[in-house]
Image (cartoon, rainbow, N blue to C red):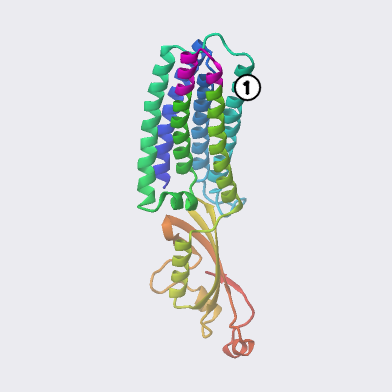
Amino acid sequence: MASESKTAVVAALIGNAALALLKGATAAMTGSAAMLAETFHSLADTGNQVLLFVGMRLSQRPPDRSHPFGYGMNTYFWAFVVSAMLFSVGGAFSIWEAVHKFLAPPAYVASPGAFFVLAGAFVFEAMSLGVALHSFRAERRGEPILRFMREARDPTLPTVLLEDSAALLSIVVAAAGLALAQLTGRPQWDAAASAAIGLILIAVATFLAYENYSLLLGEPATAEQEAEIRARLAADPAVRDVVSLHTMHLGPSAVLVSARVWFRPELTARQIEAPRADGAPDRGGGAAPGGCRARGAARHAPPPDPHRARAAGCGPARRVRS
């Protein structure tokens, strides 16, 4: 997921930086509210790609004493900041500009050059969206789109995909507003387009904020991943039964696993903690399903019958390396 996300972010960053310059120049020449809204939209998207890069880079820092589980949550935090920027810089400003132009409509709204810029912007955004869709298909692997979006634990690629989709829709709205303003001679259509663009951006920002908020609180691994983790634990020769399993993503590629297991009663703690004789990964961590790193601990769960527990030599619950 990291390589595909990086490719999509790079494509979006280059495209949005170029479009911000073109749209800004056109907005200055025409005084169009819709073009100004599009300019701030591209500026917000450009800043967002930079922040996504910051999150991806910081999340790769190794664990240390102050953060023993690593820095993977940086991805979620900076993705949340991206949603806040899209809401304020993109959406809120577009609506403010629409109100301003409604109250004081400009005498001159658009020129043919504005439509050429929007056409070029549409091509650039379509290319960026094509790169994001290619990366999206590579990661989705045939999984239904809505399910993949709902269960994705790396917000970078869905963020780029939604931003590019919103950008294409906003360009169409801006072109429609400018065309109606020219045909009718009423610049209010231009202001209405700016307001519509603002609402589109606020809707996308709200969705992204909700998803990233949930990831920051801590979401579990997917049902398929938890089933595979449970199966791996149950396949361990030292484990008699898996009583309970809890997981939480510490980042896009790291999962915290907490399992309560019933070890075989004839084994001592030293035997349980000993490395696996078959060369399998240590029970304290390793590779988890879906390409994630797993860190975890297991607690010994006594059998339901306390008399059987004492007879088998199982004492109270104790923490061991899982």
Percent position (x, y) of residue 185? 51, 12
Numbered disc 1: secondary structure: helix
Judge whether residue 182 is colored magenta: yes
Judge whether residue 284 is colored magenta: no
Q: Residue at x 45, y 50 (%)?
A: 146
Determine the image quadrant of residue 208. top right
Q: Which residues are magenta?
A: 175-191
Crowding near pointer 1: few (<14 within 10 Å), some, many (20+)? some
Amino acid at pointer 1: Val
Percent position (x, y) of residue 157? 45, 42
Q: Residue furthest front?
A: 184
Q: Determine if residue 110 is in view.
A: yes
Determine the image quadrant of residue 126. top left
Circle 1 is placed at which residue position? 99
Q: Locate residue 225 relative to residue 198 in the image: left or right.
A: left
Percent position (x, y) of residue 130? 36, 36
Q: Residue at x 62, y 50 (%)?
A: 66
Q: Nearer the viewer, residue 120 or 183?
A: 183
Count numbered badges in the picture: 1
Percent position (x, y) of residue 306? 63, 86
Q: Residue furthest top?
A: 107
